[in-house]
Amino acid sequence: MTKFESNVKVIPYSQERVYNKLSDLNNLEAFKDRLPEDKVKDLSFDSDTLSFNMSPVGQITLKVVEREPHKCIKMESVNSPLPFNLWIQLVPITEAECKLKVTAGMELNPFMKTMVQKPLKDGLEKMVEMLSMIHY
């Protein structure tokens, strides 16, 4: 399994507050207008599932497979050209702020790894940046 990690972002909200917002995917409604419309289309979600069409990749569906209260939200692809998992990890700093990191893991041969490494890393950085700007 090849892992790709975002940089760590400091979020000016408590770990519990950030976790509570991110662990229910229905809360995506509040910031779906921030997603780049030229890249992400047909966004739909419920409390456990997120589905979207991403150019040029195609249709992707993620499902929450594990929630570790206040620490981690684990998702796996249900529908994707390349199966992968995604973890959102939270670590407290103080009562009023925490660190957030996004990790993706997928089985890749060396050729595929060189092709997807940069776009995937860039995507994780954009995701963690967007998550750091949410009002929790």
Image (cartoon, rainbow, N blue to C red):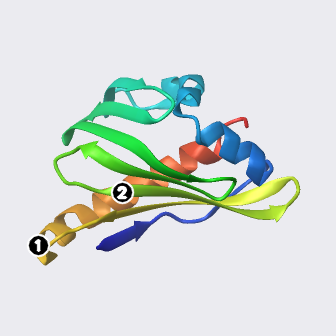
Q: Is 52 drawn above or below residue 110 in the view shown?
A: above
Whole-Å distance between the Cαs marked 2 and 1? 20 Å
Residue at 19%, 54% in the rendered image = 82
- Image location of residue 135, percent across then percent down: 72, 35
* Quadrant in which residue 36 is drawn: top left
Indicate the quadrant containing the N terminus: top left, top right, bottom left or bottom right: bottom left
Q: Comparing marks 2 and 1, which lies closer to the viewer? A: 2
Q: Helix, strand, or loop for circle 2?
A: strand
Is 127 positioned to the left or the right of 21 in the image?
A: left
* Quadrant in which residue 136 is drawn: top right
Residue at 48%, 58% in the rendered image = 87
- Image location of residue 102, percent across then percent down: 50, 58
Q: Residues within 10 Å of mark 2 (few under 14, many from 20)?
A: some
Which residue is at the far left? Answer: 111
For the image, the number of numbered tags is: 2
Q: Is 46 drawn above or below residue 5 in the view shown?
A: above
Q: Amino acid at mark 2?
A: Asn
Q: Is label 2 in contact with label 1 (beta carbons under 8 Å)?
A: no
Residue at 41%, 55% in the rendered image = 86
Q: Residues within 10 Å of mark 1 (few under 14, many from 20)?
A: few
Q: Is 46 drawn above or below residue 110 in the view shown?
A: above
Which residue is at the far bottom? Answer: 110
Residue 111 is marked as 1
Q: Helix, strand, or loop for circle 1?
A: helix
* Quadrant in which residue 44 is drawn: top left
**Chain-order first, disc 2 or disc 1:** 2
Residue at 50%, 23% in the rendered image = 33
Q: Nearer the viewer, residue 101 or 106?
A: 106
Q: Nearer the viewer, residue 4 or 49?
A: 49
Residue 85 is marked as 2
- Image location of residue 96, percent across then percent down: 86, 53
Q: Amino acid at mark 1?
A: Phe
